[in-house]
Amino acid sequence: MLEFFKYVLKMVVKLSKILLLIVTVTCFVCNAYGQNSDVCVGDVEVQMNNSSFCFVGGFYDDSSAGLVGDANFYFRNNFPVDIFLASESDFSGLNLSVEGRADVNLICDDASLTSLTLNMMNSDIFLNGELGLTSHLSLVSGKLLLEGVSHLSVLSTSENAVIFNNVSSNGSYVVGALKRSVLEGGTYFFPVGNADSYHPVVVTDLNSDDLVKITYDSSLEEAWRSVYKLEDFIFPLSGGWRVEDETVGNTYNLGLSVLNDNGDVVEGEVDVFYTESALDPLVKPIVDRSLSSFGNYYLLTQEPKGAGLYSLIESDFGLNKKRDDIDLVNTIVINSTAQAYFIIPKLQDYERVSMTVYDSWGRIIFDTKVYANDFNCRNYPSGTYYYHLVVYLSDGSEIVKDDIIEVLREKEN
């Protein structure tokens, strides 16, 4: 009989602890199907396997009689569910692994976790709020979509703080802005994309420590076109990258992926199209041809840049002519009907062209700093003329060409 009363007393003590937990401030909430239950954990791992089970309450440690967030928590759901991280709670020591088969809304307000792992079985996590990870982000499967003005920050400076499958078929990446703490001289990957496809970036050769944020923006192509009014631009991707950092003047090299929305490598040669800060019709974009291969499908800039807007354009666009790509007609035949001007095709594609023309005695007969296809050979007798041509490209480079103009006059009947 005495043993029975001891057993009853023990149950009453346990029940009082559960009631105490229920009235504590809510720090971790999952909502589904209206069921509530408290989960008490100490130095154990908690696994949620019942697809319709959820809880309202917090992690409770018997030894300290308080709420703790220092644990490994695996959450599995077969139906859509909301997870709330309350702002007054401390989860800086929590490793959260979401391994469900249906979408999850992760709702937080300036929360911090040790790590977040996605293994979503072809479903996704929608992040609402600000979330910081002090250790790492692991992307196994499922996309992490940032809703509205939500922010995701990986605060560890380790190059391996973001774990992902760096292959063209990767289906797990961040849709929205991924921010990483980086160290001088390091190499850091940013697995980002849009809702349809994976468009990762690699950052190398930083000249100082920084906090770098990269977003793949599907509307950036339209922004380029609307601001610069150049319909000849050919963008092989549906958007571009917005790169921001917190250190003014920091530079680094970026490797941009050449994967299209189908996950295939874009065909033909492409170069980097770049503008510092905001789009401005008064500031010409830079076309960077100094690219090298990095990995399987990254094009890495060799000229250090920093924050700004990046896209890719096809290399045969006029602003991006190679140094020996300008083909000019050097023989001008003058008669009553023929065009007598020395014409540079697509002259409007270049930043500026200067031209000096000499006769066979070496005397300058035509000289201009801004050539407008206005050298009229009809004004000069037949013979050989020599020209010096400098084409200034928008990226600051030049094409220099020295050649001859042969002027021939046909006898008129």
Image (tube, helix red, strand yellow):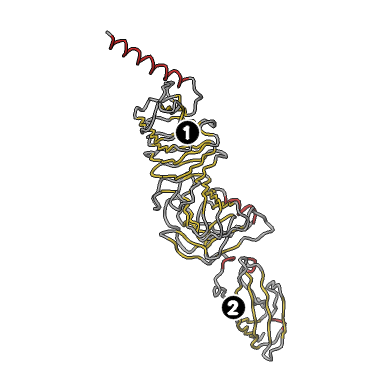
Residue at x 45% of width, y 24% of height: 56
x then y, percent, for residue 42: 39, 30
Percent x, y of residue 6: 32, 13
Residue occupying image coordinates x 39% and y 16%: 15
> Where's residue 362, x and y in %?
69, 89
Is mark 2 in CB contact (under 8 Å) with mark 1? no
39, above or below 205, in the image: above
Q: Where is the C terminus found, in terms of image quarters?
A: bottom right
What separation in Å lies between label 2 and label 1 (alpha carbons)? 64 Å
Q: Find residue 121 and name its label.
A: none
Q: Seen in the image, is 132 located left or right of residue 364? A: left
**Image quadrant assignment for residue 280:** bottom right
Q: Is residue 412 left or right of residue 218?
A: right
Residue 381 visible in the shown view: yes
Residue 37 falls in image quadrant: top left
Q: Nearer the viewer, residue 381 or 27?
A: 27
Image quarter (top left, top right, bottom left or bottom right) of the N terminus: top left
Element marked by disc 2? loop
Where in the figure is residue 204, as x and y percent of width and height?
A: 50, 59
Q: Is residue 337 visible?
A: no
Look at discs 2 and 1 and give the one toward the viewer: 1
Left or right: 348 with respect to 120? right
Q: Residue at x 64, y 69 (%)?
A: 347
Disc 1 residue crowd, few under 14, some 14–19, many 20+, Cα 10 Å: some
Q: Which mark is residue 105?
A: 1
Q: Considering only order in the chain, which callout, 1 or 2, is on the residue closer to the N terminus?
A: 1
Is 337 placed above or below 358 here?
above
Type of amino acid at the residue the image marks with label 1: Asn
Q: Residue at the front extreme? A: 2
Q: Identify residue for label 2.
A: 329
